[in-house]
Amino acid sequence: MPAVRADKLYKVFGKKAGKAVELLSDGRHRDEIADLNVTAAVIDVSFEVEPGEIFVVMGLSGSGKSTLIRMLNGLLAPTSGRVEVDGTDITALPKQGLRKLRSEKISMVFQHFALFPHRTVKENAAYGLEVRGVPREAREAKAVEALELVGLAGWEDKVPGQLSGGMQQRVGLARALAADTDIILMDEAFSALDPLIRRDMQTQLLELQETLGKTIIFITHDLNEAMRLGDRICVLRDGRTAQIGTAEEILNDPANDYVAQFVEDVDRTRVLTASSVMEAPIPVVAPDNGPRAALRTMRENQTSYAFVQRRDRRLVGGIKESAVGKAVRENAKDLSALVDAGIERVSPDTAIADLFAQAAESTFPLAVVDGDERLVGVIPRGTLLAALAPPEENGADDAADGGAEGEEADGAEDAESAGDGAGSDGDGDRKDGAEKGAEGAADEEPAAAEEGGSK
Ligand SMILES: Nc1ncnc2c1ncn2[C@@H]1O[C@H](COP(=O)(O)OP(=O)(O)OP(=O)(O)O)[C@@H](O)[C@H]1O
Ligand SMILES: [Mg+2]
């Protein structure tokens, strides 16, 4: 059973929302229904997130990411469609049930930390449990544990103002971990951080995820972040799903021009791994083959090399046509003296960027071997270079457009900051904003008020 299921979700703001859904479900673009005076934020979005998966929702500003995530935890009611959490249709739950669901099953981490400035780090981390009514001692013990997980041991009794941005965001993460919900929603959680700290946080999240195995729905407008974190990525465009797939699927097989342009600037060498570019492991010969048989195998495959592999597929090494040819002329009966056992081996998960040095050192194609030293693929040097080029459909002349859209996404980031009620525009405002945000983390009131106000 999926941990979270979105089924034909729509969120339209405005009086004529119902009419709008009708037209949108007929395939109209949201711009075409402008005369209805509505904002179609999320349009016909469906997906399933499996337990333990990191599912990233990516899109430019205004594409509907925050609206979508707020429907997933019931902060916003869909205009149409349903949301299931662990098989329960949450759109049918009464208020009380929703609140319980949010405190027990789903935590949320915001972009602007949403910490209480006058409470200690420990109290902030314990907040989700406090809302749930867990006694002080028990919740603080949990909080201390969670703070240790995110690398903040020793900071428990400080207040947020004494911490750097990156550390404050760790407190936000610790709060979600302390609450010990299976599902964590993260809305642009790392977007306010400096690039290096942001990268650290991504690494830490991936490391934590290895052991914790949470179901994480992570929102970002940053494609590189999406590709790095996401087991699968949902690309939103103007409220609709443009594509859902793994990073590799999206890079290598973009569903449309929009996605193709979007992914053009991605550092493919960091996203694609050896397993995504390797070719079938041929030709192979057995260690007890004679030189004559080995030579024939190479000729049949039109290569100047072959891999030597035991019957259990474990790699022994490689042989070269020149050496084998010479052995045949000299009537040698045995291959073993010709085998180069030191040929370069790489694991299937190695990023392409990390293959170049090894490829340059080797006169053999790289041998891709699994944990048991079994040969699972080969990467000839030409294949490695070809992998650097984007798929052919993305013509180079689209590059300028792709770049421009990327910038738009960046610029828009600031505009969003008020969105979660956790604004941080200047120190003067920080206190208020943070208090509000922290409440937002546990209660639907802020979002509900926001929705009402828009009508
Ligand atoms: N409460 C609301 N009332 C009216 N319109 C809204 C409301 N919330 C969001 N919208 C509109 O819905 C659209 C999607 O907004 P949303 O905040 O979901 O986008 P986003 O992808 O999270 O953008 P960003 O990257 O800027 O955070 C926007 O046009 C926004 O103005
Ligand atoms: Mg948003």
Image: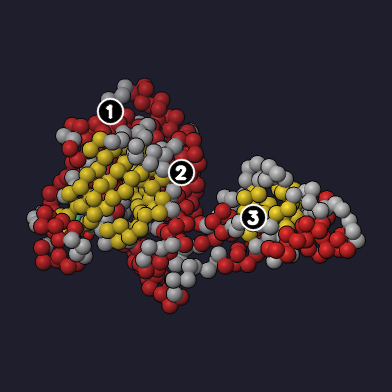
Residue 378, percent from left and from top = 64, 57
**Residue in view at x 42 percent, y 59 percent:** 250
Instruction: Estimate how packed mark 2 is, as few (under 14), some (14 to 19) or many (20 or more) residues with alpha carbons within 10 Å.
Output: some
Q: Quadrant of the C terminus?
A: bottom left
Could you tell me which residue is drawn at 60 percent across and 67 percent down? 385
At 75% from the left and 55% from the top, the residue drawn is 318
State yes or no: discs 1 and 3 in contact (Cβ < 8 Å): no
Give the residue number, with chain letter if any, for mark 3: 281
User: Is the Cβ of the residue at disc 3 closer than 8 Å to that at disc 2?
Assistant: no
Label located before the other in sequence (2 or 1) = 1
Q: Is mark 3 within 8 Å of ligand 1?
A: no
Q: Which residue is identified by label 1?
A: 132
Mark 3, other Cα within 10 Å: few <14 / some 14–19 / many ≥20: some
> Looking at the image, which is closer to me, 81 or 78?
81
Callout 1 amino acid: Arg
Q: Secondary structure at mark 3?
A: loop
Relative to 449, say whether 61 is above or below: below
Residue corresponding to mark 2: 205
Of residues 194 and 4, the one drawn nearer to the viewer in this rendering:
4
Closer to viewer: mark 3 or mark 2: 3
Q: Give the SS element for disc 2.
A: helix
Direction from residue 186 to residue 385 in the image, left or right: right
Q: Is residue 146 visible?
A: yes
Q: Is residue 200 above or below residue 211?
A: below
Q: Label 3 amino acid?
A: Pro
User: Could you say which quadrant of the image residue 283 lies in?
Assistant: bottom right
**Given the image, on which type of amino acid does mark 2 rest?**
Leu
Distance (Cα) linking label 2 and label 1 = 25 Å
Task: Please tell me in which quadrant of the rendered image residue 281 appears.
Answer: bottom right
Check contact, mark 2 vs mark 1: CB within 8 A. no
Q: Is residue 355 visible from the viewing direction of this image?
A: no
Q: How is colour applied across the structure in the image?
A: secondary structure
